[in-house]
Image (cartoon, rainbow, N blue to C red):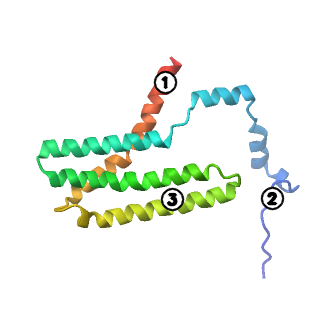
Amino acid sequence: MAKITSSPEVGDPRHATDPVDRALEDDFKPLTAEQAQAWRQNNPTTSPWRVLLLQVAIGGLMAVLTGLLSGQFRLAASVAWGAVAVVVPAVVFVRALSRQMRRSQPGSALVGLMVWELVKIVLTVALLLAAPKVVTDLSWLALVAGFVVTMKVYWLAMALGWMQRKSTLN
């Protein structure tokens, strides 16, 4: 029977003989306090609440425009429900995430993050399954359009943050 050995751990003398690890360790240089502060100024964080507000605004605007352009309330309601299926689970997740960030133990915070992500997925699926009961004469195509556009607002928020950062640097 073959003997199974584990790979060397960090701190193990065998670890230092690996040329790839040695090269990576040689390339790593910690930032100074000034460099870290400059990096933070060039890469500001985006509040998840701002992203949620943008999602609500885009989802609402899309529902109103759909209603005005089509003249059909059922399409506007379907688009709005698609936006709701993104925003409500996201609110629950961001609220839970803000509580998880206060934890001092990274392991429990990571487990909590995964649990709340699962809750978000289950809530999203439940809202999508409830759609035919909530929206009369539901249009699945309009619902999916509202869902996808509202979900993709993350990219818009990231682009707006990038453009804002770019304008402050010039």
Residue 166's tag is: 1
Of mark 3 and mark 2, the one earlier in the sequence is 2
User: Residue 58: percent from the left, percent from the top?
Assistant: 32, 41
User: Which marked residue is nearer to the observer: mark 3 or mark 1?
Assistant: 3
At 33% across and 40% down in the image, what residue appears? 57
Which is closer to the viewer, label 3 or label 2? 3
Residue name at image x 19 percent, y 45 percent = 66
Task: Give the labeled residue for mark 2.
Answer: 9
Which residue, as the protein is rendered here, is positioned at the far right?
A: 13
**Residue named by callout 3:** 117
Quadrant in the picture for the N terminus: bottom right
| Location of residue 32 in the rendering, given as x and y in whole percent from the top left corner | 75, 29
Task: Give x and y (percent) for residue 46.
Answer: 51, 37
Amino acid, disc 1: Lys
Left or right: 56 with respect to 65?
Answer: right
- Local SS, label 2: loop
